[in-house]
Amino acid sequence: MKFSIQKNGFLGIDQGVSFETSYLKARSIIVPFGMEAHVSYGAGTRNGPKAIIKASHQLNENDEQSFAKTYKSGLATLNFTAIPKDPAKALSLLTAMTRQISADGKFPVILGGEHTLTAGAVEGVSKLYQDLTVVHFDAHLDLRKQYRDSRYSHASALRRVMENKSIRKLVQIGIRSASEVDEEIGYLKAQKSRIKTFWAWETPAPKRVLDEIPTKDVYLTFDVDAFDPSIMPSTGTPEPGGLQWWQTLKILESIFRSKNVVGADVVELAPMKNFPGPDFMAAKLVYKLINYKFSRR
C-alpha cells in the first residue's frame, strides 16, 4: 500500500518551522479518517480531521512541559482518502492502512470521525502487536452488542474491539454513562476479568491506571467527550461531569512513560461553526500524545 502525504498537514508550515514531511523519514503518521456512518445525537464528526489539522497550524512547535521541539521527531500527514459508505469496508480500509504503518515501524495517529473506526485501527496494529491492552478515554462504555440495528455503531465501538483475540484487557477512564439496552451492563459484568472501568467520579491516580495495564504494548483510543462539556462542547454526545485537561494529561503521560503505546486515535470531534477553541484543544491533545511518545522530560 502506497501513501500520499499532505503538503500542509498536521502542524503545517504556518509557524515557519521546517520539519520532515516524507513518509519514509517520519516517525508519526497522522491518518485523517472522517468516518461517519452512524451518529445518534449530534452529527459532524466527518469534519473532525480537517478541523484538527487546520487548528494545529496555530500550535507552537515547542511543548510547554518538556520544551521539546516535538515536530523534530518527524511528522507526516496522509492525504484525505475516500471512505467507503459501508462501515465494514471502511473498517477494512483502516485496518489495511494501520497494519502497513505499524509494519513500517511508525506510530499511527488516527483522527476521527466516529468512534466505530477504533476497531479497524486496533485490528491493524494487532497484526504486529499481538498482546495488547486498549486504554479507552470516553464518557460512554461503548460496549453495546449493537445500537439501532447496527453492529457498527459508535455505541458498540469497544464491543467490536474486544472481539479481537489480541486484546488482553480494556481499561476505561472517564466513563459516566451506561445502559442495560443491548446487553451493555451485562457484558461489562460478564467481562470483569478483562475490563476495568474507572468511572469519572473516581478520578484515578496515574499509578492506579498503570496497575491495571498488564501488557507492555498499549493502544490508546480517546473520545473527546471524555472531557467535561464545559471545555469540550464540540461533540455529538456530551455528558456532564467529565475529565479536565491537566488531570487527563497526567494519566496520559504516565502511560506513555511506562508502556509502549503502539497507536492512538482521537475521535468524535464535531466542529462548531465560528467556535474554534475545541478544535484547537483536540489538536493540542494530538500533539501532546506525539510529544509523550517521542520526547523525554
Image (spheres, rainbow, N blue to C red):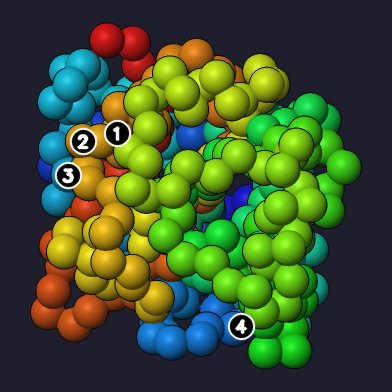
Tell me whether the residue at label 1 lies in contact with that at label 3, contact meaning CB atoms closer than 8 angstroms: no
Query: Label 3 belongs to which residue?
Result: 59
Residue 54: give x, y in percent of width and height: 26, 61
Dot 3, crowdedness within 10 Å: few (<14), some or many (≥20)?
some
Q: CA distance from mark 2 to mark 4?
A: 32 Å
The amino acid type, in three-letter code, at marker 2 is: Trp
Q: Secondary structure at mark 1?
A: helix
Q: Secondary structure at mark 3?
A: loop
Residue 130: give x, y in percent of width and height: 82, 30
Q: CA distance from mark 1 to mark 3?
A: 17 Å
At x 25% / y 36%, what residue is drawn? 247
Q: Which mark sits nearer the N-terminus, 4 or 3?
A: 4
Q: Is residue 44 visible?
A: yes
Question: The C terminus appears in which quarter of the rendering?
Answer: top left
Residue 216 position (above or below residue 129): above
Q: CA distance from mark 4 to mark 3?
A: 30 Å
The amino acid type, in three-letter code, at marker 4 is: Ala
Residue 4: give x, y in percent of width and height: 57, 54
Dot 4, crowdedness within 10 Å: few (<14), some or many (≥20)?
many
Query: Label 2 belongs to which residue?
Result: 246
